[in-house]
Each structure stands twice: as structure tokens, then as C-alpha cells.
Amino acid sequence: MVSSGTTYDGSGLLGREAEIAQLQELLRSAQAGRSAVLVVRGGAGVGKSAVLDQVVDGAKGLRVLRALGIESEMELAFAALHQLCAPLLSRLPELPAPQRAALETVFGTSTGTPPDRFMVGLAVLSLISLAADEQPMCCVVDDAQWLDRASAQVLGFVARRLLAEPIAFVFGTRQPGDELLGLPQLELSGLRDSDARALLDATTRARLDHRIRDQLVAEARGNPLALVELPRGLTTTQLAGGLGLLTSGSVPGRIEESFRRRVEELAPGARMLLLIAAADPVGDPALTWRAAERLGVEVGAVLDGGTDGLLSIDERIRFRHPLVRSAVYGSASPADRRTVHLALAEVTDPRRDPDRRAWHLAAAAAGPDEAVAAELERSAERAQARGGLAATAAFLQRAVALTTDVERRADRAVAAARASLHAADLDAARRFAEIAAEDAQDEFQGAQALLVRSQIAFAGGLNNEALPLLLEAARRLEPFDMAFARETYLVAWGSAALIAADRDSLEKISRAVVALPPVIGDPRPLDLVLDGCARLVTAGRVVAIPLLQEAAKTIAELPARDVLTWGWQASGVSAAIWDDEFMRSMYTREVQLVRAAGALTELPIHLISLGVAVIWTGDFAAADAIVGEGDLAAAATGTSLAPNAKLMLSALRGKEAEAIPLITTTIEQAGAARQLMGVTCANWAAAVLYNGLARYEQALQAAEVCTRIGELWVSVWVLPELVEAAARIGSGDVARFALARLADATEPCGTDWALGMLARSRALLADDESAAKLYDESVERLGRTRLRPELARAYLLYGEWSRRTGRREDARDRLRTAYEMFVSIGMEGFAERARRELLAMGETVRGPAAPSVAVELTPQEQQVALMVRAGLSNPEVGARLFLSPRTVEWHLRKVFVKLSISSRRQLRDALREADWAPDDSAAVTR
């Protein structure tokens, strides 16, 4: 190694015995086959890197992977992740195809659709787990505060999901970012005074008066680097007299100032070499030498003269401390920095590293430069192709700053605003949207700027601004791109109907859609959905339902791109036409497509929809698995959605102690977020719950809340609950009004679900002769569907009516059928209601069977067991649950012990009540 000075290697370890012991325990966990994660945090110079080096030195028998955050690389997507994973890339072919493709794309070894960052995280988890199966592993990431955002998100994701892998994962950081919050932490504070004095005595060349020494110790606040470096910038006289203590500022600032003084004392050639190294984040000696030669720096002479220990060179160039880099770069003049960046750009291979070259060119630009802006735009395209959202935004933001042509600047500002939005930087997105609006040179550019403003407003939370902006953007796009305008109208309509339940906005949007000119040529699926949805509001269901039934035929085969871009807006079609078979098959297919695309961010909303469809069938075990997977996906991706499926499940189960807190919390949170769809679902769940508990006054109150909200689906599904509750408490007018609305919604559909529910509700208000026929029709129609809970409720109402009208034998048979169905499904509230009716008749009622042994499993274990029972492999289960295959195996071993079985085949008998096959549309719709 060529080194121009020495460092005090023990400075970061003195007095760190307890911390070192904790880290050694972490290594022992990995050596014993258990995962361990730790974030070592502390201020600059406190000794984090020395402690992490000690971890590496003590990692006997472990394979060590290292990565280093570099401040100047923060805009280069996945830079740190590539550092960490580079030694493992030969094992990419062993990963499942979607995961392999995700890593190949982000590392630039192949092209493809930009991967979802959570798919990248899952791929890295699988990759390091695979490598750790051969040899336990220690992953060390230092200076994590300077990780590029894409790498930080992935590494935080991975660290949270390590459980049963022989992996120690250690981060060093000044202050944990959001990506590392919640992980176990070890704070490195300053040294004890006695250790600080010993370190100071060992590193100062002058004998210090004890009062001056104590003052230096106090000023350094126990910071080892400060104790070593601050005295080096002072003369012997200053040290002896304490004159060097007169400067003020924070400890890191004073350390950096000490480094700056040392840099200024170097020869010009040495200062220039340090500046080249500071401006190049790669640390590649060959690249640095080439740039130095271009600038006339004699590298050999510089190294012979020394750099005062600030720089060391072996296979990479390293600074004494990151503060040295910032001191060197910060003390250089703007002209010198531009000169160095230009030299680095000129010696960077444009084919192998075009993005770094573009970034250097941008830093070298003294003012606007169209050629450099175009290079940055191309770099943004490459970053976007790799899924580097923050990097894409950074390249485009800089491109805007370097653009002189106003029209081109407006286009780039729109792109920068949109990229910043996708990177979740809403403040930057708003700034660039304003630039786009100010620079817009024509109506189309103005419409584009307005559209991105509306998208930013929507992402910032539903508010009074978002929906009007979406509507206005769609209107202004009409003259230029009608297809895009119609897509924007659908997004606006879906946002108003499915989330906000904003009736006023829904009517404005629907009237605007109806006023559009007819579609030229064959309408797209989107056009059919949009026209049908708009006419639900403007013309009523008699007109809209045939259009939506026609739309259903086309969206059944919707391609993946459409599912991902606007498919969620089409989710209301099956509900509007009351087609349960179509609902299950469509939602199952959508989940399959979203999985195949690796769009894990989009997965939760589709899993919620599938969960609701499966709950309608009464297969609560399957629904539990789907809802649980949706919760995991939402937690992993940071997606916040109302728990609509969980609400429905808890209400039908009839466990008040579990259901009421969830209902109450959802109403409060969804209301505060203006997500009135969540409020509607929660009140619908309350109505179902209270009808099951025979508390009809409360059921009626909750149902009436739903009918007063401007929402088009759940407010209709709740009408049977309102009819039942009102009929039971003698509120005939309320019941008849609700029944009329239900007839308007169901009669045009003509499905067994729609007409079965209508017949059941009509029977509650009919005379005895008509009621019997209507109940028979309801049982017959619902019996042709897979909607077991609704069929059981039809038998219950039929049985209750039969008992009250003296048809004792019929009542007993129907009530017992209802009771047995409720028990088998798990609808405890309704089962108790049927049991009380049977007891009132003098019947003996056998209590529910003892709970299945499966209830002993944790939710995670039950999910694993159900998926393995359905035939999924450990890697497939891991991909669903965001776990490594090894952790899946760990859960499975615990399942085997609890169920007293020894093989995967035995799960079918052990979990006999579960009737579910993941993503198998034949199983779901049979």
C-alpha cells in the first residue's frame, strides 16, 4: 500500500469493550445459524468505522460482504447495492425468474421493464440467503447516511426480513434514515474522560498541562477523531498555552476545519490530487491518475512529497475520514471544482459508465449547456429503466437547470416533476411542476403541467384540490390526445368513486365524460368501463348495466399493462353488475398478473379485492391467508389502505370484541384521510355484525350512514342489511325505501346473486303467501352461486319466518340447515341467532365442534402451512410472504411440531377445513 502518512488505528476502539462484545455476540448468532441485525450509530469521528472494521476482523468462518455509502454517489441508483452484491452475481441464475430479471435490470446486465423496488428487495433477500446456505455471512454497510436512496430502501427491506438465515447484518450511520428506523440500534457515544485522556496523551507530541488537557477532552466531548486530529492542527506553543482552544463550532465542524488547514498547507499538486480524488466517488486509482495527467499533476512526485496522512492508495483510493473529502471539496474554488469534474468526465468511458460521465459534465458546467442537459436526460432514461426513481429525478432536475430553450425546459420540468413524484419527493415535484406551468409555451404543455400538478395533489392526500385538478387536466388534454384524456377521466372518476366517495365531483366528472364525442373505431376496454361508470351517475343503472356487462367481457382479458395502470378503477364493474363468478375470476387473474409483473406496490389493493371475493364464498381460511398476505405486502411497501376485507371478515365472523375496535378505528382514520369508501365499508361491516347479533337498531343506524355517502357499490350492498334491520324493528317506510333502491340496482343485472338477494329482501316485507315463494326463489338462486354466507342467511330468515307462521317442521329443517352452515363457515353471531331460534322451538342443538388445531398456529405459520398445503415450494411461499426460503422452512418446522406431523403431504389432513389454492382460478371459481 502506498500511504502518505499514518493513523492511530486504536482511536476508535479505546474504551469500546462493551460495544465490541455486543458485536461479537452478533457474529456468534450468524455462526450458529441465526440472523442478527444491528445499526451502529453515532456522530462523525466517534469511531463507527473502527468498530465495523473490528466486526470484519472478528468474522471468523463468515463470508464478509461490504458496501460503503459515498456522498457524491447518492444520486446513482443501486450503487451501494451493487457493491454489496457484486461477489454474488454469479448465483443470479439460481433465483426465480422474476427476481433474477429484477436484479439483472437494476445492475444493467440486461434490459427490461423497470422493476418494482420491493421485487428487487425480495431478490436480494433470496440471493444472500442462497449464498448463506453455503457459508454463514456478515454484511457490513458503512456510512449508511450516504447510501443512494434505492440501495437504502432495498437494504432496509432485507434487514427487516432476516430471521432464520445465518447472516449478521451491520450498518454504520451518523443518524438512521427512514429506511433503517425500527431496526436494533447501538449508539456509540463519546469516550469516557479517562479513555479520552489516555488517547490524547498517546497522540500528542507535546506534554500538556493537565488543565489544558482536561479542556481539550471537554471540548472534544469524547470524540476519538477530534482528540487525534484537533491537536495536529496546532503548534507546540498553541498546545502548551491553550491558544488553540479559542475557536468555536461543533465538533465535526472543527474537525473538518482542522483537515482544511492541513490541506491548505500541502503543495499545489497534492491539493489538486486530493480534489480529483474527492470529486470522484469511485475511488479508482487508474481513473484518478488519468485525470491528474490531463491536469498536469505529477502523481509520483505528489506521493513522494506526501499528503499528510489524508489519503491512502491501494486497490482503491481512501480518505483518512469522510470529513477529509468534504474539507477538500468544500475548500476548493468553484473554478477548480469545475476543472476537475471536466477532467474526470473526459477520462470516464462513455460506454461503460455514461451516467457518471454525465454527472461529471453537469458538475463541470458553469452555466446552461444543452449538450450536457441532453446527456442527463439520457441518463435519466437509463436510471428509470433500472428502477432508480430517485436517480431519475436527480438527473432530470439537473437537466432542467442546464436548459436554455424555454419549450424544452417546460417538457423537462414536467418529466422532472413526475419523476420526483414517483420518488416520493413531493416538495421537489411541486417546484418543478410550477416551473413547467410558468414555461409552458402552448396549451398542450400547459395541460401536461396541470396533469402532473393534479397527480401531485392526489399523492399528497385527497383534498379539495386534487379532484378538480384531475378534471381540468382531462378537459385540457381533449384537443391533443383524446385517448389520454379519457384515461385521465377514468382516473378522476375512480378516485372520486372508489376512494373519496365525493358525489359532487363524481357528478361533474360523469357529465364531462357523457359530453365527450363518440369514440372513433372500436372502443377500448377503458372506453367501455368509463362510459358505463359515467352513466351509473347520469342515467341510472338501467342504462349503465348493459354497458358495464359489455365492458366485463373485455376486461376479463385485460393485458398486464392496463391492469397496472388503470385496472383498479375497473374493480367496481363486477360489483355493479352483481356477477360473483366474474368478480372472483377477474380478481384472481389480476393478482396473478401483478405478481408476474413484480409490481409489489400495486399488490395490496388487488389482494384486498380478491379477499373480499373469497369472503363472499364463506372460505374464511382462504380469506385469512389472502388478507394476511395483503397486510404483509402493504407493510412491506408502505401502502396505506382501508382494511375493507378484514372488516368484512370480522363482521361475518360475529366476534364483537374483535370487530368493533377495527370498525371504530377505520371510521376515524378513513374519515380523517377523506377516504369515505373506508367509512362506508366500516359501517357496512357494523350493519352485518349487528344483524348477526340481532341488535337491529344499531344495524339500522350503521346501514343508514352508508346510504347517505355518495358511493356506488357498498352503499348498495348494504341495502339488504337495511331492509332486514328496518323490517325487524317495524320501520316499514325505511325498509320499503331501501327495497326500492335495491330493486333499481339488482333487477337490470339479472344474475342469481342480484335476484337472490332481492327476493330474500322482498320476502321480509311480503304477505305470507308471497313470502314463501320469495324465500324459495332466494334459496334456489343463491344455491346456484358459491355465496354460502348469503345462502345460509336466506335459510335463517326463511326458518325464522316459518316458525313465526306456525310451519314448525319446515322451520326446524331450515333453521338447522342455517345453523350447520354458519358453524361450518365460522359465522358465530349468525349461528347463535339460529341456535336461539331452535332452542325456542324446544330443539336440542349440538354446540360447535372444538376448534381446529390450526388455531394454535400463528398467523404467519398458518399462511405458510396453507400455501405449502396448496403445493407451493419454499421459494414460492417466500416470494408471497416477503421471506427467504430458509425462513419459510423455519416456520414450516414449527408447524410440523405443533401439528404433530412430519411431512408436507400430511398438511392436507391436518388442515382439512381449508379449501384454497393460491392464484388458481379454477379452484377459486369452481
Image (cartoon, rainbow, N blue to C red):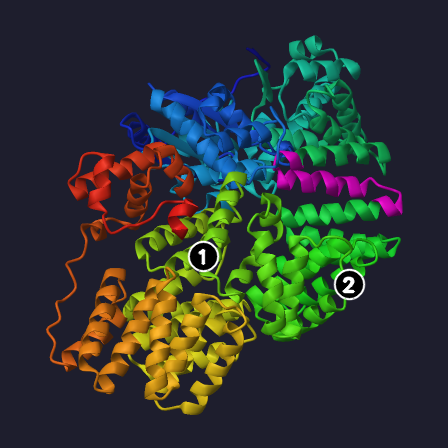
Q: Is residue 393 magenta?
A: yes
Closest to the camera, between mark 2 and mark 1, is 1
Q: Position of residue 779 (x, y in %)?
A: 34, 70
The disc labelled 2 sits on which kind of residue?
A: Arg
Residue 12 visible somewhere in the drawing:
no
Amino acid type at circle 1 is Glu
Query: Which quadrant of the figure has residue 389?
Result: top right
Query: Between 294 and 848, which is closer to the camera in this rendering?
Result: 848
- In the picture, measured across the screen, residue 598 lies left or right of residue 423, that is left
Q: Magenta residues?
A: 384-408
Crowding at dot 2, Cα within 10 Å, few <14 / some 14-19 / many 20+, comes out as many
Between 501 and 446, the one lying in front of the other is 501
User: Where is mark 2, residue-wise?
Assistant: 475
From the image, tell me which residue sits under label 1: 581
With respect to residue 431, does 887 lie above or below?
above
Does residue 758 lie above or below 402 as drawn?
A: below
In the picture, the quarter occupied by the N terminus is: top right
